[in-house]
Image (cartoon, rainbow, N blue to C red):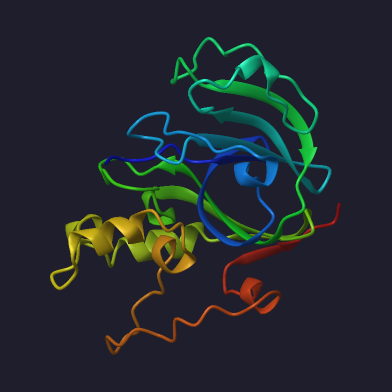
Amino acid sequence: MTTQFQDEVHFRAVRYAITAIDGDGLFEPNDHGLHPRALSSACWRGYICSYRVDGGALHLTHLEIGLPSGEDPAAARIFGCAPAPRPANAWHPDATHFELAAAVDFTGRLLLGAGHVRGAYLNMGFHPAWLYKDVHELAFDHGQLLTSTDHSTTVAELRGTLDDQATRPHADESTSSWVERTFSRAFTYSLPPLPTPGGSPPDQATPSLPAAIQTPDTVIQADI
């Protein structure tokens, strides 16, 4: 296995990788009768989504998917749209692409990262937020943006507490457990709590919305 292609969100003219998900309503192939095959060792789940926050709402704008062998790509439809021409810079030559503008009924939180930290390397799963310089948490209610929280300062502080062991299994952790953790896209993995001065970890319970967006970082209420 290797590092996986990550879904992305275009937000305020920046393309962010989705590093963690806490909620329901993002695109799922099974909901559309699709059962994708792996596109490569860097895309075992078989599809990659691009989203955009436009007018304060979340939309699915591009889908790259590996349709099962024997299935006619030209006959596939997503939200009523036929496949689009393969982009010139497409990584997977046998993937089917869709250009879309579909509203997404997502409720929950997305943790986004942009600007990969130079020198940091993790060759497994989905990259966590602490491997990025610019980190934002977006909270949605049925696809409508509620708040944007800038976690970049917290993530920079967090990186200072991590060593090279952060990109490998813990001493008492099995390889399979570590692999599962790197693929989880969980907030607790992507943005773990900072150690307390006494060395004991704080309570890691994940609060529900809207308490989850009440952090010491910069919180911007959505006004659109």
x and y percentages locating residue 49 in the rendered image: 59, 37
For image coordinates 62% across by 64% down, the residue present is 218
Direction from residue 52 to residue 45 in the image, left or right: left
Direction from residue 124 to residue 87 in the image, left or right: right
For image coordinates 19% across by 69% down, the residue present is 173
Which one is in front, 102 or 54? 102
Which one is in front, 79 or 19? 79
Considering only vertical position in the picture, is 154 above or below 25? below
Classify residue 163 by image quadrant: bottom left
Classify residue 102 by image quadrant: top right
Considering only vertical position in the picture, is 96 above or below 135? above
x and y percentages locating residue 161 in the rendered image: 28, 67
Work out which residue is located at the far front of the displayed protein and give it: 70
x and y percentages locating residue 13 in the rendered image: 66, 35
For image coordinates 27% across by 41% down, the residue present is 1
Considering only vertical position in the picture, is 63 above or below 74? below
- In the rendered picture of this protein, how many numbered marks are placed on residues? 0
Which one is in front, 166 or 182? 182
x and y percentages locating residue 209 in the rendered image: 69, 74
